[in-house]
Image: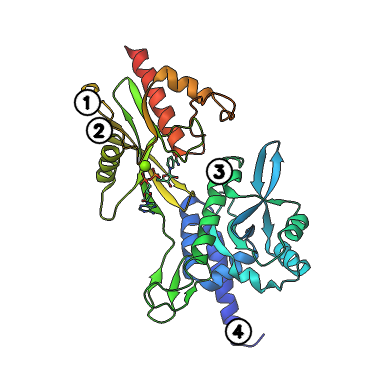
Amino acid sequence: MSALLRPLRSLLFAEHHSLTRFCSSFVSRMRYINRLKENDAACVSALQSGSILLFHRLIPLLQCSDPGTFRPIALSYSEVQSVLQRAGADGSLLKESVLIGCSEQNQVQFCLDVGELDPAAVAEECKGTFMELRKAFFLLAGAEAPLVAKAQALLRWHQINKFCGATGQLTQRNQAGSHRVCSSNSNVYYPKMSPVVIVLVSDGKRCLLGRQSSFPRGLYSALAGFCDMGETLEEALRREVAEEVGLEVQNIIYSSSQHWPFPHSSFMLACHATVSPAHSQLDIDHLELEDARWFTEEEITCALQVKAPPRRDQAPTVWLPPKHAVAHRLITEWRDQQRRSEGSD
Ligand SMILES: NC(=O)C1=CN([C@@H]2O[C@H](COP(=O)(O)OP(=O)(O)OC[C@H]3O[C@@H](n4cnc5c(N)ncnc54)[C@H](O)[C@@H]3O)[C@@H](O)[C@H]2O)C=CC1
Ligand SMILES: [Mg+2]
């Protein structure tokens, strides 16, 4: 190795080693990932020891782990190299991998879209199946649904941001895929989510759920809406509730947030809010909602028992969003709060 290269290699090794040494606690994991976004060489090195999730035109490669449960197949760099070679592609596609994050087991995770390969050959080679995320999301085990959703969202973002919106010129990505830069005016683009407020309104004894005509039969959910430019969370929430059901809410309390991949990367900001019983008369905007109703705690408890959507030949029994959706969390938080307050009455 030439004298010039040796210092570079030892620098990279030290950098990688120090980065790897850092990857032992949450803080150091976060700092490590941040550095991989800033240091292309370290990211290339992390890719060679990382795990890679494969997609085919944004459809994730999964395998059945338990009956009715799927998980993403995490391949090593060399396993992906041999999949690519067997599928007749050269290994250079690997550099298109996008950094997702670092697992709690300190495994750096990447995703790669092999859209130009034959999906059947890749699926057979990896003993898996490519499954649309809309279907897979609810069959993935707990923590893996957000991981696969984030990976798909990143890959989609790169596919639709190849050109600069201002100059029309090509944009170039960094090795981690955490940003793209316009090749002519250096505009920097970062992956974006659209902020959405989602709220469970209560009048003290009941909670309010609505449904759009696009929802599956019988499904009711918390009211939700995209934030407009310049709005605060509270302003968007008040506007959406006023628009959709004609109510003015008070006492907005933040609950939690969630990346929601459908249809394209919403950033769900979930809250509880109240109206006084004297001002709970609904005035539904049927251009926005097919229906909206007040539900008692008993009705919610019944609806939470409904595990499968009603069949076409059945009455449209009310059912609620599954555990993967933040609406489910809002509803169970409200139900639990009702039980606590009844218990203390
Ligand atoms: N994770 C969960 O528990 C739930 C998630 N959601 C999601 O929340 C989102 C918003 O719910 P909706 O009631 O449909 O929203 P909404 O009440 O704002 O109505 C949708 C309208 O917002 C506009 N819009 C669409 N995309 C936009 C964007 N990126 N930025 C600004 N405006 C946009 C369009 O005019 C569209 O017709 C949807 O993506 C839905 O999938 C909805 C309920 C539960
Ligand atoms: Mg809405």
Closer to the eye: label 4 or 2: 2
Task: Please tell me how crowded label 2 is: few (under 14), some (14-19), or many (20+) other residues with Cα within 10 Å.
Answer: many
Which kind of residue does numbered mark 2 sit on? Leu
Mark 4 or mark 2: whose residue is earlier in sequence: 4
Amino acid residing under circle 4: Leu
Residue underneath mark 4: 5
Residue underneath mark 3: 143
Instruction: Tell me: 92 left or right of 264.
Output: right
Q: Which sits earlier in the primary sequence, circle 3 or circle 1?
A: 3
* C-alpha span from label 2 to label 1: 7 Å
**Numbered label attached to residue 205:** none
Q: Which residue is mark 2?
A: 247
Mark 3 to mark 1: distance in Å?
40 Å
Residue 159 sits above or below residue 329 on the image: below
Residue 331, placed above or below residue 156: above
Q: Earlier in the sequence, mark 3 or mark 2?
A: 3
Q: Secondary structure at mark 3?
A: loop
Q: Which part of the image, by quadrant, shows the N terminus?
A: bottom right
Image height of 311 relative to 143, above or below: above
**Residue 268 visible (yes or no):** yes
Is 137 in front, or is 287? Answer: 287
Inspect this view and state whether residue 36 appears: no
Tell me the SS state at disc 4: helix
Q: Position of residue 235 (x, y in %)?
A: 24, 45
